[in-house]
Image (spheres, helix red, strand yellow):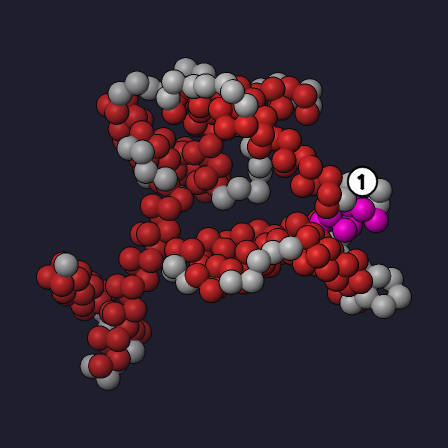
């Protein structure tokens, strides 16, 4: 396996600088800004995750390269503006990792994982204090996170400071309460769609809390549910086509019947 060398990293940085060169660079790369690249960065991160979930290791390697390119792209633009460069990014990361892991890079010892996590959170809290005037425990949770993941992170931050239920009962009750509040809005003579959306948001937030208490990652759980639904629906489509029909030709009752058959077949094959 070919090993990464400082020369290879230098070559990558030089390629990026050439792509951004006003005279001989790529027109698309030249016109990009920090803001314009953000959607591509998010997409590349998801493509890494997707390749990992599929255990497609050659694709993981390729997608990690694409994600690294995003870091190099931002670093080059920052260098052009005199903000920072790639070396600064790496130096900052090195400092942070060694500081957050004193039990690895110094002689400090922790009794267990709980103490390690407590030290990690304490270091991150110090960083938040140094970064901005916002000293809230909820500071610096990225707005661009998927909503389920962000809700989970918000709740975990609050829980670390005691704002959380100790048992599952109240969590379940809250979910039921939020369902009732959604339905209460729905049955109004003139339903207010904005209120319904607000109550649905509360229900989803409560469901994330339920998931967290069950030690289930809500984003991953929903991804699995999406995959399961898609797998089963594709089988429904195949069954319909085998009967010489289109989905539009079938009643909901017929499609439900095929769906139930698909589920039974999956269970019998387990």
Tell me: 20 left or right of 6.
Answer: right
- Residue at 31% x, 52% y: name it: 225
Which residue is nearer to you in this view: 108 or 268? 108
Q: Quadrant of residue 186?
A: top left
53 versus 187 height, above or below:
below
Q: Which residue is mark 1?
A: 83
216 versus 131 height, above or below:
below
Tell me: 215 left or right of 137.
Answer: left
Span colored in magenta: 74-80
For disc 1, the neighbor class at 10 Å (few under 14, some 14 to 19, many from 20) is: few
- Residue at 87% x, 62% y: name it: 22
Q: Is residue 238 magenta?
A: no
Residue lying at the far top in this picture: please name it: 162
Q: Quadrant of residue 5?
A: bottom right
Tell me: 43 left or right of 252.
Answer: right
Secondary structure beneath dot 1 equals loop
Which residue is nearer to you in this view: 199 or 65? 65
Which residue is nearer to you in this view: 245 or 209? 209
- Residue at 35% x, 32% y: name it: 212
Main secondary structure found in the magenta portion: helix
95 versus 20 height, above or below:
above
Looking at the image, how many numbered discs can be counted on the residues?
1
- Residue 199 shows in this picture: no
Where residue 189 appears, x then y in whole percent?
A: 37, 39
Where residue 134 appears, x then y in whole percent?
A: 65, 21
């Amino acid at each position: 396996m070919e090993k990464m060398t400082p020369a290879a990293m230098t070559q990558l940085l030089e390629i990026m600088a050439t792509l951004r060169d006003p005279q001989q660079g790529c027109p698309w790369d030249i016109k990009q800004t920090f803001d314009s690249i953000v959607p591509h960065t998010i997409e590349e991160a998801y493509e890494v995750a997707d390749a990992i979930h599929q255990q497609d290791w050659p694709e993981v390697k390729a997608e990690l390269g694409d994600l690294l390119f995003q870091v190099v792209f931002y670093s080059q633009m920052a260098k052009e503006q005199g903000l920072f460069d790639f070396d600064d990014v790496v130096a900052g990361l090195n400092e942070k990792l060694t500081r957050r892991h004193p039990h690895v890079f110094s002689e400090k010892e922790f009794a267990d994982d709980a103490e390690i996590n407590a030290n990690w959170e304490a270091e991150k809290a110090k960083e938040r204090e140094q970064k901005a005037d916002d000293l809230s425990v909820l500071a610096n949770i990225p707005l661009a996170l998927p909503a389920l993941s962000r809700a989970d992170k918000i709740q975990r931050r609050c829980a670390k400071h005691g704002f959380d239920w100790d048992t599952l009962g109240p969590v379940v009750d809250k979910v039921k309460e939020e369902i009732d509040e959604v339905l209460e809005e729905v049955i109004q003579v003139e339903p207010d769609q904005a209120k319904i959306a607000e109550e649905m948001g509360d229900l989803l937030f409560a469901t994330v809390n339920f998931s967290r208490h069950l030690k289930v990652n809500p984003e991953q759980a929903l991804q699995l549910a999406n995959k399961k639904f898609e797998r089963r629906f594709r089988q429904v489509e195949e069954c319909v086509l085998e009967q010489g029909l289109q989905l539009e030709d079938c009643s909901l009752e017929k499609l439900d019947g095929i769906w139930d058959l698909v589920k039974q077949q999956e269970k019998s094959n387990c």
